[in-house]
Image (spheres, helix red, strand yellow):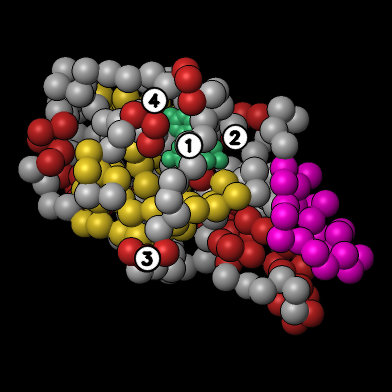
């Protein structure tokens, strides 16, 4: 995380336990206090909440998090009026360097513990059932924004291709050479979707055209844009930021 600047404009309370908690979150989990409070819905300026968070942090590691948090817990949703306009662009490169593909020729490649590995076209994905959501995207860099995405529940897709849903991980490769991975419970979460639309129009290049995985229960970096390939595995796959020390679980 050395290359990234962590901003936290909301942290006005300078009580020592908060300062210590913030330092631990950043060092051990790559998470700002602002991001944590948005993900958990806790008001971290209230003493009880701080105690609860400190208690949880002392036991926080990937396995404990997975056991503590109910994978069916829903991320908050918002009205249309709450959508952030313009929604920010972010990537490990600048907006001028966005990659695009010919969406008609694009295919989503499948590998690993999946029965039917035939690649999927955009048209085939559009023919599957779609859902939409207005949810908050929380970036580890200390900003968040509310957006509207529509697409195929990822669970529907995994079941359709015969993925081994008892496997531990789902990994993603992107055509901008980004990668990330999530646990199977998150992959099966009802709000995890293969997003094809942003605000009722096809996903534009800056938000990940033609397909991004939208995971509102995870931090922004666990939401891969520009998807090229999906694989199911029991071997920890890591990812672009995960391999540089970001906490793998990064969510609720
Ligand atoms: N392919 C790809 N996906 C990515 C990234 C990236 O650099 N490449 N950056 C991640 C990070 S850190 C964030 S905050 C979000 C930003 O998504 P947005 O541009 O739609 O706001 O994309 C995530 N997914
Ligand atoms: Mo991010």
In space, the residues marked 4 and 2 are separated at their CA atoms by: 15 Å
In space, the residues marked 3 and 2 are separated at their CA atoms by: 34 Å
Does residue 21 show up magenta in the picture? yes
Residue 69: image x %, image y %? 52, 66
Count residues near mark 2 (Cα–Cα under 10 Å), then give few for <14, some for 14-19, many for 20+. many
Look at discs 1 and 4 and give the one toward the viewer. Answer: 1
Ligand 1 contact, mark 1 (Cβ < 8 Å): yes
- Looking at marks 4 and 2 on the same chain, the residue that comes earlier in the sequence is marked by 4
Count residues near mark 3 (Cα–Cα under 10 Å), then give few for <14, some for 14-19, many for 20+. few
In space, the residues marked 1 and 4 are separated at their CA atoms by: 16 Å
- Looking at marks 1 and 4 on the same chain, the residue that comes earlier in the sequence is marked by 1
Q: Quadrant of ligand 2?
A: top right
Query: Which residue matches tag 3?
Result: 81
- Looking at marks 4 and 3 on the same chain, the residue that comes earlier in the sequence is marked by 3
Q: Kindly give the residue lying farthest to the right in the view shown.
A: 16
In space, the residues marked 1 and 2 are separated at their CA atoms by: 20 Å
Q: Quadrant of residue 47?
A: bottom right
Regarding mark 3 in the picture, which secondary structure is present there?
Answer: helix
Q: As drawn, is 177 to the left or to the right of 17? A: left
Q: Residue at x 65, y 39 (%)?
A: 246
Query: Which residue matches tag 4?
Result: 174
Point out the stretch of residues depicted in magenta: 6-28
Q: Between residues 134 and 180, which one lies in front from this camera angle?
A: 134
Query: Which residue matches tag 2?
Result: 242
């Amino acid at each position: 995380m050395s290359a990234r600047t962590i901003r936290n404009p909301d942290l006005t309370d300078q009580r020592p336990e908060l300062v210590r908690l913030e330092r631990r979150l950043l060092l051990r989990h790559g998470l700002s206090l602002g991001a944590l409070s948005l993900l958990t819905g806790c008001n971290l300026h209230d003493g009880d909440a701080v105690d609860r968070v400190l208690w949880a942090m002392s036991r926080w590691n990937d396995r404990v998090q997975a056991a503590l948090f109910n994978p069916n817990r829903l991320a908050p949703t918002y009205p249309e009026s709450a959508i952030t306009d313009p929604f920010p662009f972010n990537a490990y490169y600048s907006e001028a360097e966005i990659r695009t593909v010919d969406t008609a020729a694009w295919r989503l490649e499948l590998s690993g513990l999946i029965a039917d590995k035939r690649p999927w076209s955009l048209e085939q994905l559009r023919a599957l059932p779609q859902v939409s959501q207005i949810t908050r995207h929380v970036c580890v860099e200390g900003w968040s924004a509310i957006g509207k995405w529509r697409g195929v529940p990822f669970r529907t897709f995994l079941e359709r291709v015969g993925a081994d849903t008892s496997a531990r991980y789902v990994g993603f490769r992107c055509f901008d050479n980004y990668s990330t991975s999530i646990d199977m419970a998150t992959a099966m979460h009802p709000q995890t979707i293969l997003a094809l639309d942003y605000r009722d129009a096809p996903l534009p290049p800056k938000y990940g055209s033609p397909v991004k995985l939208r995971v509102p229960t995870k931090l922004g970096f666990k939401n891969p844009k520009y998807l090229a390939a999906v694989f199911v595995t029991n071997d920890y796959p890591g990812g672009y930021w995960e391999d540089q020390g970001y906490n793998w679980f990064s969510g609720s």
